């Protein structure tokens, strides 16, 4: 905006000057038209005006040339020249065209070979030059300093001495952001056409633009390298996660127990590739008994899945149909705490119970897991199965109690992890997902266990947003 205002002010000033000068000429012509002095004054004023106009036009043309030169010089930054490998031939053609040079040669630094490499040329055979080692340059001077700027100066001196050039010759170093890339040599064949200060100005500007071009190319190559490296790492992580998911799915139940009098349906959805929720069914010698385990390790992803594997294995090692729920829970808690160590922040919820169809009872111990819900068919009411102890892996001395509840034919149980509560709160935008689950379960008391789980599965799978926590749900129906 400031430049535009300044330009407009200058144009208005010239316009006022021309108007004033023409008015003065007109005034003198009218007042002194019969006088020789008046005629002479008019001619002098017209001559001065012509010179001013000529200089103004020349200045505008020069300014236009500079602007055009700058605009064309920025073509060296064209990213199309930097795709895959830089088109050095095309870049040097632009340099030769804009600088009006007969030939251009590009030497690039090769740090691994300790030499300057003839990369490309325009207007002169590339074979006219050879690669130049650093030690050749250092032999040419008395200085032992081998920094990049000193090497580039020595390179120019070396070429001027070694090669017999006719006509004008000049060179410029190529560096940007304290990174040295090489040297640019330019020349003219006509010995009567020396390089002027304007030519040197063009060379400096073009070498700066070429340095930026090389710098951008290096940055692009580095970004491509980093992107490929990250992609390889990502693929490796994806493969490892996929293997972890396969291993975890192998540990979880693939088929549901076939037990007369009980119908069971289960849904498990990790928030990521692997999760911290687990569930297990245990059959014993008595066909009327079924052991049931469900739990949730704090956290998500790989750390939670590793701890989940430990907790799952501890229950599998120590648990059986005959196990007393409270004693089993205490034993697992001690072993888990010893495994995690005193400084660990990991912990796990768990519920271990036994369905007994002969006694029509469910005996369980609950270590801080979400309260399961029981639908009582006779009273058509919902009751919760409260916790009987603290989370696993926090205190070695934790104690756990055992609860025994009665059930009847037609009753239903729903076991779940807190991810289901969080899902309902997010999807239904309600403040209390637990209350929503109670209503959800009660309204579907006449549906089968499979129908209820299928409905939950569809709600989760068809939800457009990603879930934030692992979701596990299991419905047990007393037939």
Image (cartoon, rainbow, N blue to C red):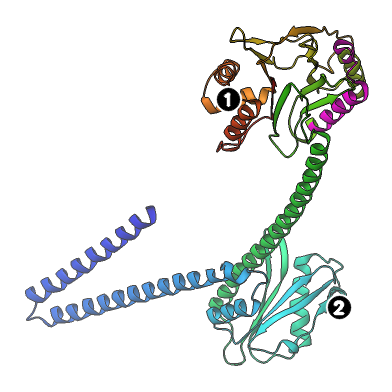
Q: Is residue 27 left or right of residue 315?
A: left
Q: Which structural element holds mark 1?
A: helix
Residue 196: assigned label: none
Asked which quadrant contains residue 419, the reply is: top right
* Residue lying at 73% horizontally and 65% vertically, measured from the top left: 180
Q: Is residue 437 left or right of residue 225?
A: left
* Residue 202: image location, x then y, percent: 56, 74
Labels 1, 2: front one: 1
Residue denoted by label 1: 424
* Residue lying at 76% horizontally and 11% vertically, measured from the top left: 360
* Residue 82: image location, x then y, percent: 63, 69
Q: Is residue 340 visible?
A: no
Q: In the rendered structure, does residue 326 fall within the stretch colored magenta?
A: yes
Nearer the observer, 325 or 380? 380
Residue denoted by label 2: 136
Q: Which structural element holds mark 2?
A: helix
The magenta segment:
305-328
Taking 343 as reference, is 238 above or below it? below
């Amino acid at each position: 905006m400031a430049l535009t205002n300044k330009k407009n002010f200058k144009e208005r000033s010239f316009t006022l000057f021309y108007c004033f000068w023409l008015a003065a000429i007109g005034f003198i012509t009218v007042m002194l038209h019969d006088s020789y002095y008046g005629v002479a004054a008019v001619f002098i004023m017209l001559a001065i005006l012509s010179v001013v106009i000529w200089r103004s036009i020349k200045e505008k043309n020069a300014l236009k040339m500079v602007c055009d030169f700058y605009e064309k010089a920025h073509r060296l930054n064209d990213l199309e020249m930097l795709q895959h490998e830089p088109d050095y031939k095309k870049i040097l053609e632009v340099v030769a065209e804009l600088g009006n040079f007969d030939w251009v040669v590009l030497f690039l630094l090769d740090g691994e070979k300790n030499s300057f490499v003839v990369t490309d040329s325009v207007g002169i055979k590339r074979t006219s030059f050879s690669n130049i080692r650093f030690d050749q340059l250092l032999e040419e001077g008395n200085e032992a300093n081998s920094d990049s700027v000193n090497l580039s100066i020595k390179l120019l001196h070396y070429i001027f001495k070694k090669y017999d050039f006719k006509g004008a010759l000049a060179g410029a170093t190529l560096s940007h952001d304290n990174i040295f890339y090489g040297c640019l040599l330019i020349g003219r064949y006509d010995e009567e056409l020396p390089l002027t200060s304007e030519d040197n100005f063009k060379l400096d500007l073009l070498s700066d633009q070429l340095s930026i071009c090389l710098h951008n190319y290096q940055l692009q190559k580095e970004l491509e390298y980093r992107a490929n490296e990250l992609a390889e790492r990502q693929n490796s992580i994806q493969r490892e996660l996929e293997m972890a998911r396969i291993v975890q799915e192998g540990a979880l139940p693939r088929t549901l127990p076939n037990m007369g009098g009980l119908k069971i349906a289960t849904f498990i959805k990790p928030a990521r590739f692997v999760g911290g929720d687990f569930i297990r069914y245990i059959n014993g010698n008595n066909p009327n008994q079924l052991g049931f385990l469900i739990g949730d390790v704090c956290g998500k992803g790989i750390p939670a899945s590793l701890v989940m594997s430990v907790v799952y294995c501890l229950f599998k090692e120590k648990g059986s149909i005959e196990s007393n729920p409270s004693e089993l829970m205490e034993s697992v808690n001690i072993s888990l705490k010893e495994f995690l160590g005193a400084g660990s922040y990991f912990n796990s919820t768990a519920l271990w119970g036994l369905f007994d169809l002969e006694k029509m009872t469910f005996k369980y111990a609950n270590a801080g897991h979400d309260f399961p819900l029981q639908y009582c068919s006779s009273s058509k009411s919902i009751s919760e199965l409260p916790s009987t102890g603290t989370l696993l892996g926090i205190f070695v001395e934790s104690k756990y109690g055992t609860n025994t509840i009665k059930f009847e034919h037609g009753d239903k149980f729903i076991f779940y992890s807190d991810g289901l509560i969080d899902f309902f709160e997010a999807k239904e935008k309600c403040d209390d997902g637990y209350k929503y689950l109670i209503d959800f379960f009660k309204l579907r008391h006449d549906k089968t266990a499979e129908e209820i789980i299928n409905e939950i599965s569809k709600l989760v799978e068809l939800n457009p947003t990603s879930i934030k926590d692992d979701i596990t749900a299991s419905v047990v129906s007393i037939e």
